[in-house]
Amino acid sequence: MKRAAIGTACIGMALCFISIQSTYAFLSDKGNDSINQFIPGNIVTEIQEEFDSAQTLRNINTSACEIAKSAWVHNSGENACYVRVSVAFSNSDFGASLDGIDTVNWIKDGDYYYYTAILDPSESTSALFTKVDVPRVDKYKAVYLENAESLDVIVYEEAVPIQHGNYVFTDYREAWDFHTKNR
């Protein structure tokens, strides 16, 4: 019985010694340093437009009015991106609409026009539209000539990166789907 007790004590001491050595080895292990470099995205986009401010809506009561105006997006940041644009009018009573829309490079989905190509740094999209049409005013509508000067075309744009981590999106739709779901 003394032998069994001595054997059990020796096994217990051996297990304690092994566990202490393993713990020490685990805690004192030093590998090579790794450097994880994170580079923040730099997406800076801006709406640019061409518009002759001398154009007016003064003749809107007698005939339709066509206003020459175009708008596009410029990427002045350091990273490539996908862009989308929303266009609204300040006064819906005019019945204004966009004309000369580029349907080759832009796709309308819901409230947005999506630029289908990647917008690289220092590049610009094609113009989304080239004109704004305002139909002839019906004398029974609620538009009055004193308010005719107050039609504003509101152009709003957003941009998202072309990749998330190491994953590069295959097209504009995948990028926008990801970013709208993960806001």
Image: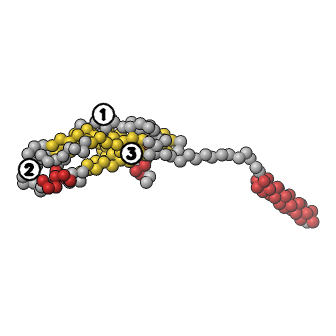
- Marks 1 and 2, Cα distance to the nearest angstrom? 34 Å
Q: Mark 1 points at which residue?
A: 104
- Is the residue 16 above or below the residue 37 in the image? below
- Marks 3 and 2, Cα distance to the nearest angstrom? 37 Å
Display colour scheme: secondary structure
Quadrant into which the N terminus falls: bottom right
In the structure shown, which secondary structural element does the residue marked by tag 3 occupy?
strand
Q: Position of residue 158 (x, y in %)?
A: 38, 48
Residue 171 visible somewhere in the drawing = no
Residue placed furthest toward the front: 54
Three-letter amino acid code at disc 3? Glu
Crowd tier of the residue under label 1, counting other residues whose Cα lies within 10 Å: few below 14, some 14–19, many 20 or above: few
In the structure shown, which secondary structural element does the residue marked by tag 1 occupy?
loop
Which of the 4 image quadrants contains residue 66? top left
Q: Mark 2 points at which residue?
A: 138
Crowd tier of the residue under label 2, counting other residues whose Cα lies within 10 Å: few below 14, some 14–19, many 20 or above: few
Three-letter amino acid code at disc 2? Asp
| Residue drawn at (76%, 55%) of the image | 27
| Residue drawn at (16%, 47%) of the image | 57
Q: Mark 3 points at which residue?
A: 46
Callout in the foreground (1, 2):
2
N-terminal of the pair, mark 3 or mark 2, is 3
Q: Position of residue 143 (x, y in %)?
A: 13, 54
Residue 31 visible somewhere in the drawing = yes
Give left or right: position of 164 versus 59: right
Q: Nearer the viewer, residue 158 or 154?
A: 154
